Amino acid sequence: MNSIVQKRSTGLAIFSTGFVLLWLVIAAVPFLWTLWGSFKVQGDFFSKSDWTYAIYGVRTTVETGDAFTGNGYYGAWVEQEFWRATLNTAIVVVLTVVISLTLGTLGGYALARSGFRYAFWILMAALVFRAMPHITLVSGYLLPFFQWNLWGHLPTTIIVLVAINQPFTLWMLHSFFLNIPKDMDESAMVDGCTRFQAFRHVIIPVMWPGVITTGLFSFLLAYNDFAVTAMLLSQDNQTMVPKIASFLGTTQVEGNVMFAVAAVVSATAPLFVLVMFFQRQIVSGLTAGAVKG
């Protein structure tokens, strides 16, 4: 009997290991292939005659004298000034995260500690807005932005991203606050703290893991956004994702695909580092509210 159980356990372990390895290959190979191809010329990476050109760099050697070239990165970052899009992305992301977390922390705490029925309906309304497609929300801002001459500027995009992101931060932080006993607030106020002092000096230090987790998800939402930034920013103020799309060109204007490939690698690499470094916080965020709320 024990041998049968042991064989089943071994078989399950082999199957699980094989499945994980297969998933890693499927998930990692596209990025690794793109990383490799970013150091080639377009004739190699998108070769129609022989896909092995992308491995050996046949045309890259002919055109540049070496099997690898950094022309894609130079063209994207220097010639097309991708660094401006990176700077714009940093500004938009940082301000979006800071404002969203500030409002979400205060609002989440107030709703978690409120005993009134309206707290539930506020959260339900926030959930409805969170479920709506971003493009639907953006269209409502276009007319006033055009009339007030606000279209095309970074603050405009930040306002819209905060509005879209706020329901998410409110729900996440509300769930974390529910897992903190109310006795902590009450004990602090018995010792002479006001409600805000108890929130600042007692609750927030305990809440830092939840704040970090919510901040990471807010960062990813703003960093990867395309619909909002593409519609609300002009060509001079583009963030990274719309800028990458512009490298591909249109039916009327020829683009440079290798600039886009190099820019994709440049934009994706920080996300890998961020996710690997904060993987525990991200996992805890996915399971937030499983006990309460």
Image: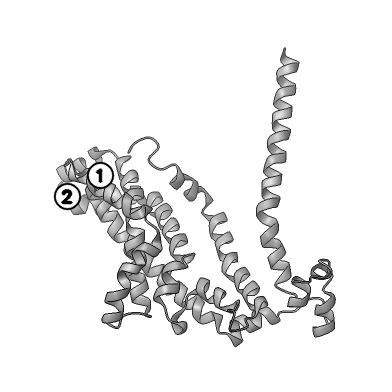
Q: In this view, does 106 lie above or below 225?
A: above
Give the left or right position of residue 230, taking residue 21 as reference. Answer: left
Q: Where is residue 183 shown, x and y percent of the image? A: 23, 38
Give the left or right position of residue 254, taking residue 163 as reference. Answer: right
Asked whether the viewer can see residue 202, the reply is no
Residue at the image position 51 percent from the left and 54 percent from the top: 278
Q: Which amino acid does label 1 sit on?
A: Ala
Q: Which of 270 and 64 is in front in this view?
A: 64
* Marker disc for residue 112: 1
Q: Where is residue 14 shown, x and y percent of the image? A: 73, 34
**Residue sticking out furthest to the bottom:** 79
The C terminus is located in which quarter?
top left
Residue carrying label 2: 193
Give the left or right position of residue 43, taking residue 161 as reference. Answer: right
Mark 1 vs 2, N-terminal side? 1
Residue at the image position 67 percent from the left and 79 percent from the top: 72
Is label 1 or label 2 in front?
1
Q: In this view, does 72 lie above or below 264?
A: below
Say few, some or many: other residues with alpha carbon within 10 Å of mark 2 (under 14 / 14 to 19 / 20 or more).
some
* Marker disc for residue 139: none
Determine whether the residue tagged by mark 1 lies in a helix, strand or loop. Answer: helix
Determine whether the residue tagged by mark 2 lies in a helix, strand or loop. Answer: loop
Number of residue marks? 2
Q: What residue type is labelled 2?
A: Cys
Q: How is the image coloured?
A: one colour
Q: Nearer the viewer, residue 39 or 252?
A: 252
The N terminus is located in which quarter?
top right
Q: In this view, does 250 lie above or below 228?
A: below
Assess whether mark 2 and mark 1 are in contact (beta carbons under 8 angstroms): no
